[in-house]
Structures are given as C-alpha cells and as structure tokens.
Image (tube, rainbow, N blue to C red):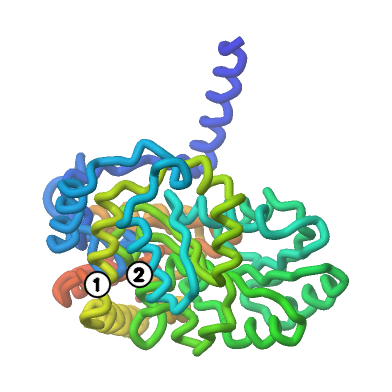
Amino acid sequence: MYTKFQEHLRKELQDIKDAGLYKNERIIVTPQSSDIEVESVEGEVLNFCANNYLGLADNSRLIEAAKRAMDNRGFGMSSVRFICGTQDLHKELEAAISDYFKTEDTILYAACFDANGGLFEPLFTEEDAIISDALNHASIIDGVRLCKAKRFRYKNADMEDLERCLQDAKSCRFKVIATDGVFSMDGNVAPMDNICELAEKYDALVMVDESHSAGVVGATGHGVAEKFDCYGKIDIFTGTLGKSFGGAMGGFTTGKKEIIDMLRQRSRPYLFSNSVAPSIVGASIEMFRMLGESDDLHTKLMENVEYFRGKMVDAGFDIKPTQSAICAVMLYDAKLSQDFAAEMQKEGIYVTGFYYPVVPKDQARIRVQLSAAHTRGQLDKAIAAFVKVGKKLGVIK
C-alpha cells in the first residue's frame, strides 16, 4: 500500500518544489541572537528574521533562571496539568502573565497554536458567531474550524466590513470578534479602539492574539490594550512565550476568570498535552521580573525600528507602514523576493522572502524583523547590504 502512497507524496513534494514553495531548514550552530553562525555559510551572519524582538533568546539571566528551575523542580512533568503536572512555578507564571496584561486569570499551553486551537470550541456553539479578521494567524483559523459556531470574516482591519459582519450576526446568541494584535506579514496593528467600540455597540466579546504585539506595541510594550487604552474592554488575550518573552516555547490565554476556568475544564490542548517544562516556566517568571524592572529593551527596540525604517525609506525602498518590529520591504515579484534574499545572504544578512500563497499574489516582500539585540553597526551593515543588492537587482536606483 505504501508504494502508491509514496508515489503520491513524491509527486506532491515535487509540485511544491516546482512552485518554489519548498521549505528548507537552515541549520544554526550557535545560540539564537542578532548574529549567528549557519551551517554551509562561512563566517558570521546577521539575523533579521527571528521573532526575538526584545533580544532575550540568549539572555544570561534567563539561562541561569532556567538552570535554577531544573535544579529545584526537575526536567519535566510527565503529566498533564490536572493529573499531577502543576507545580507552584506554573501558578506563579500564570499570575505574572495576568499582572502583565491586567487580567483576572491565565492558563498555560504548550504553544500559542494550542491556545488558539483550544479556545473557541469549549466556549461557543452553533448558536454563536465568531467574526474573524481575514489576515488572522493560521492557529486562529484552525481554532475557528474546530468550533461549531457560525463563521464570519471581515477584510483586514476594515471597520466598515466588521460592522457589516456584526449586523449579519445579530441573531446569534453570543458574538466574539477575533483578531491578531499585529499582523505578521505587514506589521500593522489592529485598530483595537475601533474594534472595542463596535463590540460595545453590538454586544460582542473581543479576543486578540498578542503573539507579535506583546513586548513591542504600546508605550512600554505591554501590547494593544496599552496602546489603545482598552484595558477592561478586551475579554480574551492569547499569546506566546516564544517571541518577545524569551523565545523558548509555551503559550497562554489570559482574560476573564470564568473564561479561563471553563478552558481548564474543556480545552483539549490543555487537557491532553504535557505541562510546560520547569526550565521554561522558571525562565519566563524571571523574564517578567526583568520587564517589570526596566523598559530599556523596549525603548531600544523602538529606536532600532525607527532608525532602520527611516534609512530604508531614504534609500528609496517601498516599506509598509509599521507600528511594530516588523518591516515589510515590498518587492511585489515572487522570484525577485527569492533572489533578493539569496543575494542578501551572500552579504552576510539573514532575511527571508515571502510570496504567494503566504501573502497575496503580486505582494511579495522581504520581511525584516528588528530586535533590541541589534546594534547600530549591525543595522548599518544590513542597510548597506539592502542598498547594494537593491541597486544590483534594479529595485532602487
């Protein structure tokens, strides 16, 4: 039987390669940081495509905290939370997340993909409606698919279209608006003030995924609620420990206590997945302690974003407007984006080209992700490489 299936898979894989969509992994042989070493590439490479927004992935204080947690609480839990997988550290981290987002309670998951995947089905039925932004992350899309609620989709950050969906869903028992905080391909921030106004007008709940916005957006990086002064108006936040918050793994849902309590009872990824490892939990507690002591990392990140974007615009590049750490350098042509990324690697700059179907047709781009770990010298080297490659490939004059 496998012979036929093998032939089928080989053909499918070849089709993916022929379409230029095959994903190859580049092997990093150093800790994750702003400068890394990669197998098959000589010398140091500057990394501009990690989600390491606050530069904490190789932070020595977090590494020591992870070691202490393993010394004091062991390597793993070998259990789901509700059987024998909850330590005092798990409850301490959940309290720290609640404090950070100014919410009532928090539940931990193995990843934010699990948090989003296990969010909707325990809370909503066929009597209800989920109204989702068209550019939401795949994990939200999958979570919605697992739920029997009616589905509505509005154009990205389009409030007129959102209101149309809310009107269409007015007969439903409960309505929830689901959106990313920052949309990962364009770097734009969801207009949470307007979303919350419409939610109040139409008696809807609000859910936001803070994966790319927490640690980045807002006066002190506390996310979209801080940026738009929406504390108390957003009912559900989901997020990850794998980007700004240290870069390891683990996700969470935080919000109203009854919602969190129901997820503890019925959310399948929580009920049937292993507890987050003590090393990650201990380091994450230390990370929130660090962020509470100083806003220096967020300040440095925003300075880097402003500097990089300004210099790139001055050089003649077409840059999507951004309020986040994501800068989309628009190239529009799919092959050009691949060629551009390859040329950048020759210059010692690690970036990735994105093109259809990851982004809409004729909207190919290089997605640059800035970090607080980037030095001014590293930014200048990257900008110089962009200018050199841009002129070589005819993107700028």
| Residue 248 vertical placement versus 27 (above, below) | below
Q: Quadrant of the N terminus?
A: top right
For the point 13% across and 57% down, the residue is: 64
Q: Position of residue 182 (x, y in %)?
A: 49, 72
Q: Is residue 336 visible?
A: no
Task: Tell me the number on the disc at residue 96.
Answer: 2
Q: Quadrant of the C terminus?
A: bottom left
| Residue 315 vertical placement versus 173 (above, below) | below
Task: Tell me the number on the disc at residue 193.
Answer: none
Q: Of 193 and 331, which appears nearest the observer?
A: 193
Looking at this view, name the residue that lies furthest to the right: 171
Q: Of 166 and 83, which appears nearest the observer?
A: 83
Q: CA distance from mark 1 to mark 2?
A: 8 Å
Mark 1 burial class by Cα count in 10 Å: few <14, some 14-19, many 20+: few
Q: Is residue 239 visible?
A: yes
Q: Position of residue 305 (x, y in %)?
A: 31, 79
- The answer to whether residue 196 is left or right of residue 213 is right
Tag 2: residue type? Ala
Q: Number of callouts in the render?
A: 2
Mark with earlier residue (1, 2): 2
State the SS at label 1.
helix
Q: Of 66 and 32, which appears nearest the observer?
A: 66
In the picture, residue 242 is in which quadrant?
Answer: bottom left
Q: Which residue is mark 1?
A: 289
| Residue 300 vertical placement versus 142 (above, below) | below
State the SS at label 2.
helix
For the point 82% across and 61% down, the residue is: 127
- The answer to whether residue 53 is left or right of residue 111 is left
Q: Are marks 1 and 2 in contact (CB under 8 Å)?
A: yes
| Residue 375 vertical placement versus 253 (above, below) | below
For the point 36% across and 80% down, the residue is: 221
For the point 55% across and 83% down, the residue is: 232
